[in-house]
Image (cartoon, rainbow, N blue to C red):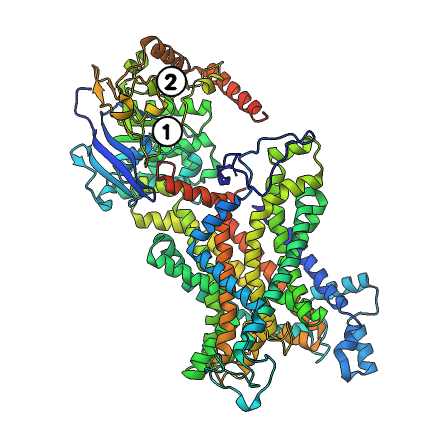
């Protein structure tokens, strides 16, 4: 187990290093002088010099990279070309909204996918199976932002039950916060649920068809016991894995839904940074999301190993 | 064996509804099993031998499976029983041991838990008693220091050791009947011999009836009291083991015997195996089901008229109009027997080495 | 591995590739391990799958729409008519008009051309680049393989939407750059799929044998490896086309893709949301177009996977043959 953990951690660190190179390269791939471009019409020689020096753009590339990496490791991701705000601070302000939405989406997804996937597997070929399949097929094909717009059209525009967009911290005003969370969480949650339904179904089916289930039945155990301890328990590992991966993907993948609902998350921060050519902010956002994805993957893998005795003891 | 049988199967039929029509997998099976007796059911894969024992307690998917006939276990007929009632028979009164110990055990639970979960449902014992019984069972099947191994997971055991665990599970509730379904097929030769010996010893000790399902007539001679040879869902020959090996009558039995690998002459297997494939259970041939592959077919009668199962004396039954000529039959049986003499340790070692080197070379050609 | 191989007799070769026994490459018995798809059978299975057949029909309709868009539109797509803004669907304007009084139906029809063009070109980019990378990595192995696969790992750490946005930010937003960005984003997926199948056939006895007989690498790849990776690549292509359409729409929606006034479905939805109070038809029809097209590609992809997966095929055959104890 210790060897496995060490190996996975090393792999993740290596990937993270690769990610950092890509993120660093981002600013240097832009044609022309990024600071000049970012400042645009507000050009001011003094500010220009300061920003260039702050971004370390006068140094040789390799020096710049390690300098940047070293500071990033200390939590210093530079300052915004536009506002002068430290990038780390901007990210921390936006992280709660994104995290809240991602976690809510996964919860909504699980609430849908666990019953739908299990019923669909158990009643394979029956009507409920077809319904679940149709749902997941629709869910993976529907553009989430369109579906979000339809929700706004229905619940905000027509029925006037919910505010059409915006975010309120749950800590400040739980009622308003929750009301504003419902539509974005449903939008991402249903799509996530559709993806998860497929995995739950196939994991349960695979477990159901395994030989040890037949043997457990041959022991004279009641159906319910067999299902709980020999089907669900075995299907659980892949389900946990894929749910974790979905969470990782969502953290960076809800840019578009954040735009639809004017949700002040990391994705929208990144997008705004693109529009304003605010490269340090874009770099910071991309780095954070990729790092979060790698870390979640790592945690999921280690969790999987914990759940699976075959890896645990090796 | 004059006492009443513990298990009587009468006119058992098992079929599956499929897209290509009804697949008749078992077609009218009759046999008795007595306490302490070992019945071997022999046939190729698809002959219905395995399904017939699973269907006794409806361990087949239903639907599309259907079961009819009678399965008397003591005074109870299992066929009309509901799923709920059958739970009292599965594992409790009919124990099962399946082919592949690698897949029979659930990888995510410790073996102790898998061994005791059936006992918890079936036996009215305290947790402490169940634990003692589990240790005792593991001891019986030859697992060293069992009390330390209850919390180990299946992957921590070798294939042979896992099969011992599976056997312990099969025996855990003291069943009257143990079904060993290809229980040694997935194991190497040495381990096979050990497992065969183990089941024989436990049978003497516990007095249960054993149904030994195999495609390998070689294994059978050393362990069985009586043999059923199945083909296309029916018994084609049934006899006490000595009678069968003294004089096999049915062309299929002789074919099976001749297709056995003989030590020192493994090439024979290919030369003498039965031509063709078993028929599909949805499209059984007219007449005798075996006639398209039969080397002793005599006339058109085999292709038009289904032969009945007839008794030729002393409980020796055959389902054929024609018997295999005596010299050929005896030669085949004698060859088959060479391999099945209870091997001593050296022989087994040689056999394993021989088989190993053969398959090693075979891989390169 | 042996159980997911098709039980096809060697004689059942696809007609597309006649084999020519020659001195330098003697006829070898093709082993059962070949994953080569059987085209005719594949098509039959595909069409017997109702969902996939529906997907195929929808796709044909979509492609025809894109091709004949000029004939199908009812108004010039960029002709403003401020006097007739936000007109609801009518006999004249089937899908209503937008904030500039443009005909939504005509724009949705023309949008099919934009969407399919972006999807086709970007997926072609990733298909070619990814297949090359995967072939080289898988066939050559060694450090090339290690480097490529670690790079693929890194690429997978970025969410597709974000990576595409970042790339468009670097290149500058335009139709062309959107296609390039999506092409780059999808390349690692193809590289991984191809490498996986190359690895699984590379060590096949059959390929080892013809290599030992002196066949050149190029010939082996072209004649023996590529046909074997075809099945997973075809499936991946169909699914990627679906995802490319979604991704392009999303990019255009957030302003990091195709630019106005091109009638891209995503752009139309962005405008629709701005004027959400003015009319439901603005959002419903373009969104429906995306949804239907993506769904069609997904249904096709799933159908193709089932049809090309040898395990699935044997399953169907086994089911047809009916039960027995080996089920």
Give the label on residue C285, or none.
none
Q: Chain of mark 1?
A: B
Residue at far top of view = B327
B287 relative to C280 in the view: left or right = left
Please tell me whether mark 1 or mark 2 is closer to you in this view: 1
Q: Callout 2 environment at 10 Å: few (<14), some (14 to 19), or many (20+)?
A: many
A239 relative to A291 in the view: left or right = left
Q: Quadrant of residue B305?
A: top left
Q: Chain of mark 2?
A: B
Give the label on residue B278, or none.
1
A273 relative to C83 in the view: left or right = right
Q: Please tell me whether residue A135 is drawn above or below residue C41 in the rendered image.
A: below
- Asked if residue A142 shows in the view, the reply is no
Residue at far front of view = C71
Between residue C171 and residue B294, name the one nearer to us. B294
Residue at the image position 55 percent from the left and 74 percent from the top? A258
Residue at the image position 43 percent from the left and 47 percent from the top? A206
Q: Position of residue C119 (x, y in %)?
A: 60, 63
The mark total stands at 2
Q: Are marks 1 and 2 on the same chain?
A: yes
Q: Between disc 1 and disc 2, whose residue precedes? A: 2
Q: Please tell me whether residue B130 is drawn above or below residue C288 in the rendered image.
A: above
Helix, strand or loop for disc 1: loop
Q: Callout 1 environment at 10 Å: few (<14), some (14 to 19), or many (20+)?
A: some
Helix, strand or loop for disc 2: helix
Residue at the image position 71 percent from the left and 46 percent from the top? C144
- Asked if residue B122 shows in the view, the reply is yes
State how far apart marks 1 and 2 are (Cα): 16 Å
Residue at far bottom of view = C83
Q: Position of residue A220 (x, y in %)?
A: 29, 41
Give the label on residue B257, or none.
2
Q: Position of residue B142 (x, y in %)?
A: 40, 28
């Amino acid at each position: 187990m210790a060897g496995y953990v060490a190996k996975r951690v090393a792999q993740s660190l290596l990937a993270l290093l690769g990610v950092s190179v890509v993120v660093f390269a981002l600013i240097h791939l832009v044609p022309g002088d990024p600071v000049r471009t970012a400042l645009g019409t507000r050009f001011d020689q003094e500010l220009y010099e300061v920003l260039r020096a702050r971004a370390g753009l006068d140094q040789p590339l390799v020096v710049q990279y390690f300098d940047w990496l070293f500071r990033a490791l200390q939590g210093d991701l530079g300052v915004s070309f536009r506002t002068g705000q430290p990038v780390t601070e901007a990210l921390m302000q936006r992280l709660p909204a994104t995290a809240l939405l991602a976690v809510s989406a996964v919860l909504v997804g699980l609430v849908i996918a666990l019953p739908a996937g299990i019923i669909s597997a158990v009643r394979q070929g029956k009507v409920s199976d077809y319904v679940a399949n149709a749902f997941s097929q629709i869910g993976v094909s529907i553009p989430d932002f369109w579906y979000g717009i339809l929700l706004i059209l229905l619940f905000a525009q027509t029925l006037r039950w919910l505010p059409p967009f915006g975010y309120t911290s749950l800590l400040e005003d739980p009622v308003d916060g929750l009301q504003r969370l419902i539509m974005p969480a449903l939008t991402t949650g249903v799509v996530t649920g559709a993806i998860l339904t497929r995995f739950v179904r196939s994991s349960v089916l695979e477990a159901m068809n395994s030989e040890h289930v037949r043997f457990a039945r041959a022991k004279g155990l009641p159906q319910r016991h067999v299902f709980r301890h020999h089907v669900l328990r075995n299907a659980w590992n892949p389900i946990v894995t894929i749910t974790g991966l979905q969470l990782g993907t969502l953290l960076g993948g809800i840019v578009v839904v954040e735009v639809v609902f004017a949700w002040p998350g990391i994705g929208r921060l990144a997008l705004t940074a693109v529009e304003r050519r605010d490269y340090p902010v874009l770099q910071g956002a991309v780095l954070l999301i990729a790092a979060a994805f790698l870390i979640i993957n790592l945690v999921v893998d280690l969790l999987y190993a914990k759940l699976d005795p075959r890896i645990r003891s090796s | 064996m004059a006492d009443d049988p513990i298990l009587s199967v009468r006119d058992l039929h098992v079929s599956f509804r499929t897209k290509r029509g009804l697949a008749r997998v078992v077609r009218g099976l009759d046999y008795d099993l007595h306490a302490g007796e070992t019945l071997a059911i022999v046939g190729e894969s698809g002959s219905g031998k395995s399904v017939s024992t699973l269907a006794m307690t409806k361990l087949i998917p239903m639907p599309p499976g259907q079961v009819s006939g009678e399965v008397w276990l003591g005074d109870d007929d299992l066929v009309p029983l509901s799923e709920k009632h059958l739970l009292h028979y599965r594992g409790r009164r009919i124990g099962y041991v399946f082919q592949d110990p690698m897949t029979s055990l659930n990888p995510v639970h410790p073996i102790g838990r898998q061994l005791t979960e059936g006992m918890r449902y079936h036996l009215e014992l305290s947790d402490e008693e169940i634990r003692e019984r589990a240790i005792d069972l593991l001891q019986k099947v030859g697992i060293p220091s069992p009390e330390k191994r209850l919390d180990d997971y299946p992957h921590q055991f070798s294939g042979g050791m896992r099969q011992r665990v599976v056997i312990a599970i099969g025996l855990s509730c003291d069943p009257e009947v143990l079904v060993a379904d290809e229980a040694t097929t997935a194991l190497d030769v040495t381990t096979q011999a050990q497992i065969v010996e183990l089941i024989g010893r436990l049978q003497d000790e516990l007095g249960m009836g054993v149904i030994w399902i195999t495609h390998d007539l070689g294994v059978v001679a050393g362990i069985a009291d009586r043999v059923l040879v199945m083909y296309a869902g029916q018994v084609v020959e049934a006899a006490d083991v000595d009678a069968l090996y003294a004089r096999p009558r049915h062309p299929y039995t002789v074919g099976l015997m001749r297709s056995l690998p003989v030590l020192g002459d493994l090439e024979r297997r290919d030369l003498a195996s039965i031509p063709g494939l078993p028929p599909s259970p949805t499209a059984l041939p007219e007449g005798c089901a075996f006639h398209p592959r039969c080397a002793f077919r005599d006339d058109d009668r085999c292709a038009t008229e289904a032969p009945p199962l007839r008794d030729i004396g002393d409980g020796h039954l055959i389902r054929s109009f024609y018997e295999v000529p005596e010299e050929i039959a005896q030669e085949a049986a004698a060859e088959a027997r060479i391999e099945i003499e209870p091997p001593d340790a050296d022989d087994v070692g040689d056999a394993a080495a021989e088989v190993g080197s053969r398959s090693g070379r075979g891989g390169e050609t | 591995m042996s159980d997911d191989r098709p039980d096809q007799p060697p004689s059942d070769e696809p007609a597309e590739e006649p084999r020519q026994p020659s001195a330098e490459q003697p006829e070898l018995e093709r082993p059962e391990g070949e994953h080569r798809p059987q085209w005719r059978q594949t098509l039959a299975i595909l069409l017997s799958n109702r969902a996939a057949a529906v997907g195929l029909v929808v796709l044909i309709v979509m492609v025809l729409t894109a091709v004949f868009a000029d004939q199908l539109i009812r108004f010039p797509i960029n002709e403003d008519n401020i006097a007739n803004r936000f007109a609801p669907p009518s006999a004249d304007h089937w899908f209503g008009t937008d904030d500039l009084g443009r005909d939504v139906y005509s724009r949705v029809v023309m949008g099919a051309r934009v969407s399919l063009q972006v999807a086709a070109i970007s997926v072609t980019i990733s298909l070619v680049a990814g297949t090359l990378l995967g072939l080289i990595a898988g066939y050559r192995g060694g450090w090339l393989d290690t480097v490529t696969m670690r790079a693929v790992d890194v690429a997978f750490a970025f969410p597709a939407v974000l990576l595409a946005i970042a790339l468009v930010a670097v290149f500058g937003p335009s139709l062309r750059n959107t296609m390039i960005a999506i092409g780059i984003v999808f390349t690692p997926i193809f590289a991984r799929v191809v490498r996986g199948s190359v690895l699984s056939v590379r060590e096949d006895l059959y390929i080892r044998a013809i290599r030992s007989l002196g066949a050149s690498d190029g010939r082996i790849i072209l004649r023996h490896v590529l046909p074997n990776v075809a099945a997973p690549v075809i499936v991946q292509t169909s699914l990627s086309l679906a995802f490319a359409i979604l991704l392009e729409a999303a990019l255009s929606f957030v302003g990091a893709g195709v630019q106005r006034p091109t009638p891209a479905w995503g752009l139309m939805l962005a405008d629709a949301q701005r004027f959400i109070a003015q009319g439901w038809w603005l959002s419903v029809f373009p969104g429906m177009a995306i949804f239907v097209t993506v769904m069609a590609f997904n249904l096709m992809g799933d159908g193709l996977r089932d049809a090309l997966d040898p395990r699935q095929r044997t399953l169907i055959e086994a089911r047809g043959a009916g039960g027995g104890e080996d089920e």
